[in-house]
Image (cartoon, grey):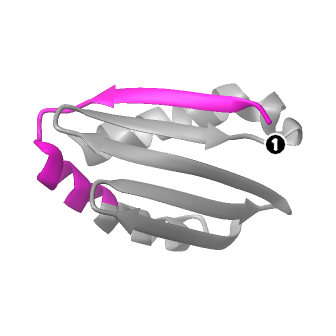
């Protein structure tokens, strides 16, 4: 399965970045209710794994929050590879908004 890796710097400190991401991630299903049929997140201190189903396609990934950087690794099914650029752009945009 192809992988999408994003590293996004921030200046918030690890604890604040984790809190912001936790708060925002819980709203994703509401924001994208027409696109996401299932969303699960599992936090373990400063790391999170997730699984979502959108339009019948399952996407999984991991997020790790470091003191000055957030790392996002997403496992993309082959069918989603056509949208890889759009997915990456949207993730980068959201991270920028959350971690500003």
Q: Residue 30 location, x and y as percent? A: 52, 74
Q: Please state, as top left, top right, bottom left or bottom right, where the N terminus lies in the image.
A: top right
Q: Residue at x 37, y 44 (%)?
A: 64
Return the residue at label 1: 77
- Asked where in the image residue 55 lies, by quadrant, the reply is bottom right
Q: Is residue 7 magenta?
A: yes
Q: Is residue 87 left or right of residue 43?
A: right
Please tell me whether mark 1 sits on a helix, a strand or a loop.
loop
Q: Is residue 13 magenta?
A: yes
Q: Residue at x 12, y 33 (%)?
A: 11
Give the image location of residue 37, x and y in percent. Answer: 72, 73
Towards the viewer: 38 or 27? 38
Q: Is residue 74 above or below residue 37?
A: above
Q: Residue, x 30% and y 67% (percent of image)?
A: 23
Q: Which residues are magenta?
A: 1-21
Residue 95, how many percent across, how many down? 36, 41
Q: Nearer the viewer, residue 91 or 41?
A: 41
């Amino acid at each position: 399965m192809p992988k999408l890796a994003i590293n996004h710097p921030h200046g918030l400190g690890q604890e604040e970045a984790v809190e912001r991401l936790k708060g925002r991630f819980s709203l994703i299903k509401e924001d994208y209710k027409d696109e996401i049929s299932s969303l699960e997140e599992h936090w373990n201190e400063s790391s999170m794994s997730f699984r979502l189903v959108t339009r019948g396609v399952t996407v999984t990934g991991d997020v790790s929050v470091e003191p000055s950087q957030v790392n996002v690794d997403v496992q993309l099914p082959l069918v989603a590879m056509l949208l890889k650029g759009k997915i990456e752009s949207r993730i980068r945009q959201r991270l920028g908004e959350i971690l500003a």
